[in-house]
Amino acid sequence: MADQANKLREKVTSQTQSTPRDRKTKVIAVTSGKGGVGKSNICLNLALSMEALDKKVMILDLDVGMANVDVLMGVTPKGSLISMLEEKLPLEEVLETGVNGLTYIAGGNGIGRVFSMSEDQLHHFFHEFSSLQGKVDYIILDTGAGLTQESMRFLQAADDIFIVLNPEPPSITDAYAVLKALHMKNDQLPIKLIVNRTINEFEGEQASANFLRASKQLLNKPIEVLGYIPDDDAVRKAVMAQTPYLLQYPRSKASEAVNQIARTYLDLPTQYKLGVKGFLMKTLFHK
C-alpha cells in the first residue's frame, strides 16, 4: 500500500501542478459529533441554496452505513461510490441527478472500504474523481457522524470543515470531541460551525458560545459561526414527503436560515487551494 500511495502522490502532484485552472473547485466536508443532528439534511438543502446562488454544487455521500441523501430527495440511485469501485465503473455511471438538477453520488453499503481497496481500485478511484476538476464550484462531502480513519482522511483534506451540532449538552460535548481530534491532527484546519434545531436565535447563540468558549480556552482555536437553523415542523413534514424543505417550504424559518448560511459562507473571503486533485493528493498523506 505504501508503494501505491507514493506512486499516486507523484502522479497527482504532477497533474495538479499542470492544471492550475482546477483551483476554482472547493471541497467542503460536513461532520458532527453524533448521529441524528440533521447533518445530511443540511448538506442537501445547503447545496440547493448555493445552486440557487449560481454555484454548481455536487454532493458525495460518505455517511458510513447511514447514506441517505437520496432518501431525503425521494430518488433511487442507479449506482454508488461502492459499485463504482467494485465494478470499475466510470464516474459518469454513478453520477446522479436529483431534485432541481442537483448532482450527487450515493455512498452505498460498505463505504468504510474506500481506503482499504486493492491497487486497481485505488487507481480507479483517483482517475475517476480527477475528472471532476473544473466541472463544479463546490463538492460537499456528507461524512459520517463521529470519526473513523476514513472520514478523518477526508476531513483533513477538505478546504473547509463544517461541524453541525444541536443545542443539547451531549451534542456540544461530542462535537467538541471531534474538534479536538481534528485539532490534534492539524491545528490549522479551517473549521466552521452550524447549530441546528434551535428553539430560537438566543439558544443558538448560547450553544455556539459554549462551543467557542471551550475551543478557545483549551485549543485556542478560532471558529467561524455560519448560523443557526430553527427547530421547524416544516423540516419534519418535508422529510416525510421525501422532498427537501427548501423546495417544499421555501418560506419556512428553516429555509430562510439555510439561505442565510449559504449567503454568509459565499460572502466570506475565499482562498482556493489545489482543487479536486489537490484534495485527492492530500487524502493520501493523512490517516
Image: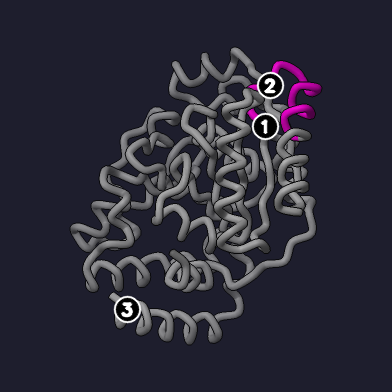
Question: Which residues lie in the magenta part?
Answer: 195-208
Q: x%, y% of residue 71?
A: 38, 30
Element class at badge 3:
helix
Closest to the camera, between mark 3 and mark 2, is 3
Q: x%, y% of residue 128?
A: 36, 67
Tell me the residue at 51%/19% (across/down): 238
**In this picture, residue 61 sits left or right of residue 197:** left
Q: x%, y% of residue 181?
A: 55, 52
* Mark 2 Cα-neighbour bin, 10 Å: few <14, some 14–19, many ≥20: many
Q: Which numbered marker is on residue 195?
A: 1
Q: Quadrant of residue 194?
A: top right
**Relative to 221, residue 34 above or below:** above
Q: Given the current orientation, which residue lies at the most extreme front position?
A: 218
Query: Do the residues under discs 1 and 3 have CB atoms within 8 angstroms?
Result: no
Query: How is the rendered protein coloured?
Result: one colour
Residue 204 in the magenta stretch? The answer is: yes
Q: Which numbered marker is on residue 2?
A: 3
**Relative to 134, residue 230 above or below:** above
Q: x%, y% of residue 280?
A: 46, 69
Tell me the residue at 75%/22% (across/down): 203
Element class at badge 2:
strand
Q: Quadrant of residue 164?
A: top right
User: Which is more toward the observer, 191 or 91?
Assistant: 191
* Mark 1 Cα-neighbour bin, 10 Å: few <14, some 14–19, many ≥20: many
